[in-house]
Amino acid sequence: MSFKGEHILSVSQFDRDTIQHVFNIAHQMQPYASRQKRTKVLEGAILGNLFFEPSTRTRVSFGCAFNLLGGEVRETTGMESSALSKGESLFDTARVISSYSDVIAMRHPQAGSVAEFALGSRVPVLNGGDGANEHPTQALLDLFTIERELASSGQTIDGMHIAMVGDLKFGRTVHSLSKLLKLYKNLRFTLISPQELAMPSDIVDAIQSAGHQVTVTDALEGNLNADIVYQTRIQEERFPSKEEANLYRGKFRLNQEIYTRYCKSNTVIMHPLPRDSRMEANELDNDLNLNPNLAIFRQADNGILVRMALFALTLGVEHLLTKYECAVPWYSNKHSG
Ligand code: CP
């Protein structure tokens, strides 16, 4: 089982065995992510980190993950600061940047753009999100988080109940996560969204064809007694206008009172982040911050582990981590996960 030299463009590249292999390597990254020790296994390697759409977590965690393996990061952010804005093709950009780098992470607003870019790249390309299409590394870290959170209460992914809430039409994280989850057994999906922002029918069909139970609803109340509630943001940037996005903002708010009334006592709350904390949206209220089942920051931390694993695997060094280990000489009280 090898990912050496492979692009990571879609969750459809994974099956349960390869997912578990990625997770096994991700677990091995914990001591490095929490600064108990360092590894210089990628010393001398360069990540080209190309983000043509806004990002905080994905961009910075790709960069940190690469640094934590000893590598260096060169990046460009925003379309306007790149030669794409002068009419350069994705193919030409890929040819050039792939000669400067050993691996590339990329986000772009158009569906299919990262795959198109990868055709011109001579090094592995990791999809950091392409429009409303896919966000495979987010889906892997979400699944890793679900597995960890459920394991802490003796549960498994097989047989679990997940409620996905919000903008299920444009939310690429729920698209990718659903495609991974359908590989598991006997799941219940409750898909909660305005009818206009429902999960695309091809994804619902694929989930049902894999034998899972699906409930589609536009009501939050009464539909949250799941093992996992995965809340999402209205993807304003994918709407024709801000006014149209405003029609849906704030329709599905989760706060402690709603949690207490409708969720199970151990329902895990997830969100890919950023959560929209503006008053008119407030999809995940700050009053949940002290709820121990709020997993959103553990989820973001897990992004480092999973992205470190993907870099180690695509560059073929996953078996060399300990060989290049060294001590952490600085004071560190760092926690991760
Ligand atoms: N989850 C996620 O993709 O966050 P960013 O947009 O901050 O990268």
Image (tube, rainbow, N blue to C red):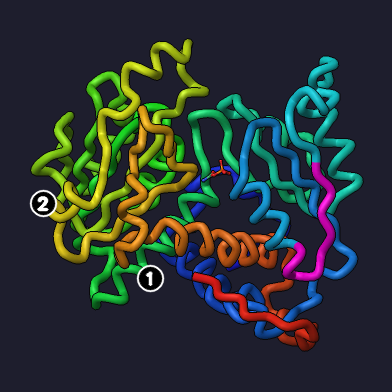
Location of ligand 1 given as a quarter of the image? top right
Q: Residue at x 61, y 76 (%)?
A: 334
Query: 227 or 264, which lies in front?
Result: 264
Query: 246 or 11, which lies in front?
Result: 246
Q: From the viewer's perspective, is the residue at label 1 or at label 2 nearer?
A: 2
Residue 25 in view, yes or no: yes
Report x, y in % for residue 203: 33, 35
For label 1, being within 8 Å of ligand 1 is answered no
Residue at label 1?
Answer: 148
At mark 1, the secondary structure is helix
Q: Earlier in the sequence, mark 1 or mark 2?
A: 1
Left/right of residue 81 with respect to residue 7 in the rendered view: right
Left/right of residue 221 with respect to residue 96 in the rendered view: left
Q: Amino acid at mark 1?
A: Arg
Residue 228 occupies which quadrant of the picture? bottom left
Q: Amino acid at mark 2?
A: Arg
Report x, y in % for residue 22: 54, 66
Report x, y in % for residue 205: 26, 34
Residue at label 2?
Answer: 261
Report x, y in % for residue 75: 80, 44
For label 2, being within 8 Å of ligand 1 is answered no
